C-alpha cells in the first residue's frame, strides 16, 4: 500500500462530509510517535467534523487507527481550530 494512504483516506472522508471541500487542508508529519495528521477545515464545517459530543471526530479517529494498523503505523488526528470559529474554550474556575 502507498505511504500516504492514511492522508488520502482522511482527505476523501472529510471532503465527503463538509460543505466546503475546497477548504480542506491536511498536513502529514511522521516522527518517533507515529504519523500525525493535522486537519484544517472551513469554520462553518467544524460542527460537521466534530459532531454531537465529538462523535464524528471519534469515529474518524477510529477509522484512521484501522488504516494505521493495516500499514503498521500509529496514526493520530489533530483537528485545528479555524479562525472565526464560534467555539469558546472552557475557563478554569478559580
Image (cartoon, helix red, strand yellow):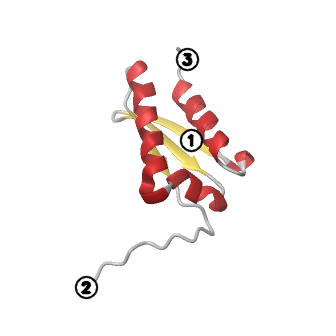
Q: Quadrant of the C terminus?
A: bottom left
* Residue 8 in picture, x, y percent from top left: 60, 30
**Which residue sits at x=41%, y=37%?**
62
- Element assignment for label 1: strand
Q: Are marks 2 and 3 in contact (CB under 8 Å)?
A: no
User: Which residue lies most toward the bottom here?
Assistant: 94
Q: CA distance from mark 1 to mark 2?
A: 37 Å
Mark 1 and mark 2 lie on one chain; the one further toward the N terminus is 1
Label 3 residue SS = loop
Q: Residue at x 44, y 42 (%)?
A: 59
Do we see residue 4 in this rendering? Answer: no
Q: Dot 3: within a 10 Å radius of its alpha carbon, few (fewer than 14), some, or many (20 or more) residues? A: few
In the rendered structure, which disc, 3 or 1, sits on the residue that comes first in sequence? Answer: 3
Residue 72 shows up from this direction: yes
Q: Which mark is residue 94?
A: 2
Residue name at image x 63 percent, y 34 percent: 12
Q: Residue at x 49, y 48 (%)?
A: 56
Disc 1: which residue: 27
Q: Earlier in the sequence, mark 2 or mark 3?
A: 3
Q: Give me the C-alpha separation between circle 2 and circle 3.
A: 50 Å
Q: Which residue is mark 3?
A: 2
How much space separates mark 3 and mark 1, taking CA atoms? 17 Å
Amino acid at each position: 500500500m502507498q505511504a500516504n494512504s492514511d492522508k488520502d483516506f482522511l482527505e476523501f472522508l472529510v471532503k465527503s462530509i463538509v460543505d466546503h471541500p475546497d477548504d480542506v487542508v491536511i498536513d502529514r508529519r511522521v516522527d518517533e510517535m507515529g504519523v500525525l495528521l493535522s486537519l484544517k477545515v472551513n469554520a462553518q464545517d467544524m460542527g460537521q467534523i466534530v459532531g454531537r459530543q465529538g462523535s464524528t471526530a471519534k469515529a474518524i479517529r477510529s477509522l484512521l487507527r484501522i488504516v494505521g494498523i493495516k500499514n503498521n503505523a500509529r496514526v493520530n488526528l489533530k483537528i485545528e481550530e479555524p479562525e472565526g470559529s464560534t467555539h469558546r474554550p472552557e475557563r478554569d474556575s478559580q
